[in-house]
Image: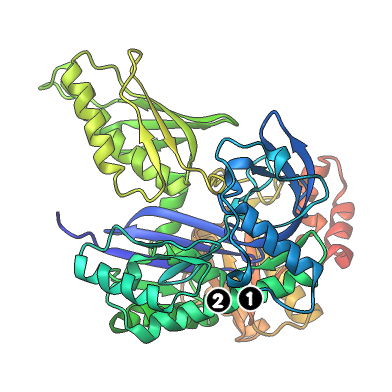
Amino acid sequence: MEQLKSELFVDVQPKEISIALLEDSRLVSLQKESRNVVYAVGDLYLAKVKKIMPGLNAAFVDVGYEKDAFLHYLDLGPQFSTYSELLKKALDDTATVPEIAAIERRPDIPKQGKIADVLQPGQKLLVQIAKEPISTKGPRLTTELSLTGRFMVLIPFGNKISISQKIKSSEEKARLRHLISSIKPEGFGVIVRTSAEGKRVAELIGELRSLLDAWKSSVAKMQISQPPALIYEEDSRAVSIIRDIFNPSFEAVYVNNAEIFEQIQAYVALIAPDRKDIVKLYTKDVPMFDTFNITRQIKSAFGKTVSFKSGAYLIIEHTEALHVIDVNSGNRSKASQDQESNALDVNLRAADEIARQLRLRDMGGIIVVDFIDMAQSEHRQQLLDHMRDIMAKDRARHNILPLSKFGLMQITRQRVRPALDITTEESCPSCFGKGEVQPSLLFTDKLEEKLEYLTQNLEVKKFTMYIHPYVEAYVKKGVFSLYGKWRRRFGRGVKIVPDESLAYLQYKVLDAEGREIYLHEESDMSSAHSKNATRSDRNSEESTPATEN
């Protein structure tokens, strides 16, 4: 199979990081994560057991989240007795950090045991986030702790060495197993990741030491903390996000933030030194996602209705319990084909788009797909085989069932994070949904007022104003453009840049450091407040800067 051209785009904004993966310029994966995210997968917390639920064989645990976290008996791990002994020793004697090797190994807890036999309310636990909070549910926890690095995963209280199945060479597997067994301390297990293949001994030893140091510092921090408390989190949120999706075969990785660029380039230099030049710093004023046509693809891919080939389309609905996808042939018709062949063709193309949508939206749980009915069993089997083939490269664990007699396909897909639900409809920024707006012809007058307020009242001399591309084209048209007039009046530090993510009559302003300057005021909504307001009332509202931030 021909290798697809893959490119990664890391868009760093003040509040969140967005990572888009393009294959042959087509968006196939999008991840968004807050820069100040809490309760992220992999974080360690010192927590306290709140309530034992014998009927669920689980406990509710306080980690500081608004909803109690959920810890099932099966997530305690077989080595829970040894883990509990170390915790007790660490919390009883806070002067010294206990070594796992010095703890006597206890027998594994039984798989069919009861949670009430091993946990009690008020008990302190060192827990790890296994699933982030989703909808009305709190985080899901585990006490089978692990610390993830670039080349390996360190597992306290384990002793097994596992090698990634993606490493095919038996010689390389033997080398890695021998190396790790010779440097691994007693009481720790290790999972060797695919990226460790071919790496030098010094690199692997260096990472193992850093993971062991992270474990020791976590135990030490736990000893001086009171629950609930965050004990350990990844150093770089950006690197942890891309670690699992990055591939050295990528043609390019574009980053629009100098600090994150250096972190990612250092990461790539570690795992693929000869490929570090693929990381490129994006420095243009135009938003990166606009330049590479990503914004437009997001707008078209995340709506309720998603079109694909030849007029056919999907309707995607989300509920608390499951996701429902309906396949429609639309106005697609081919006279040369009978209805059965036409249905098969639409279904196969729909399967391609559904596989993309599951990755793109990170949809998890139960997905029910209503395909177009097909009478022939061989066609139904062909559709099932095709769906399994194209879902094979999905990193999330999944299971696909054959079509039912009603033509429904059921898919279960691993859900670790909330599904990415991006609203593509745009609220009117002038009336905020009231239904009446100021004349759009006067929008440039409002922009001029904002520029005057910024430069004269706030005394901001260098800033960038982002507006819709249509408005930007109007502002910059002609030799004697409005843009030229504004720069002569307000200074050369004023920049006007198009942004496809904005609505038609919307704008935003960033200062020279990239921080947003909020300029919303009551005058933006004044037309929706009252049709009968006098002109003088409106003028007095617009001239009052008290509501400016």
Q: Can residue 436 be seen in this view?
A: no
Image position, residue 223 (x, y; %): 77, 71
Q: Which residue is drawn at 63% across and 44% down?
A: 134
Image position, residue 447 (x, y; %): 67, 66
Residue 228 position by quadrant: bottom right
Q: Which of 447 and 518 is in front in this view?
A: 518
Question: What residue would you read off at disc 2?
Answer: 212
Q: Nearer the viewer, residue 414 or 183?
A: 183
Type of amino acid under label 2: Leu
* Disc marking residue 216: 1
Q: Residue at x 60, y 56 (%)?
A: 106
Image position, residue 353 (x, y; %): 33, 40
Tell me whether the residue at label 2 lies in contact with that at label 1, contact meaning CB atoms closer than 8 angstroms. yes
- Element under label 2? helix
Type of amino acid under label 1: Lys
Residue 441 position by quadrant: bottom right
- Element under label 1? helix
Q: Nearer the viewer, residue 321 or 508?
A: 321
From the viewer's perspective, is residue 234 above or below residue 341?
below
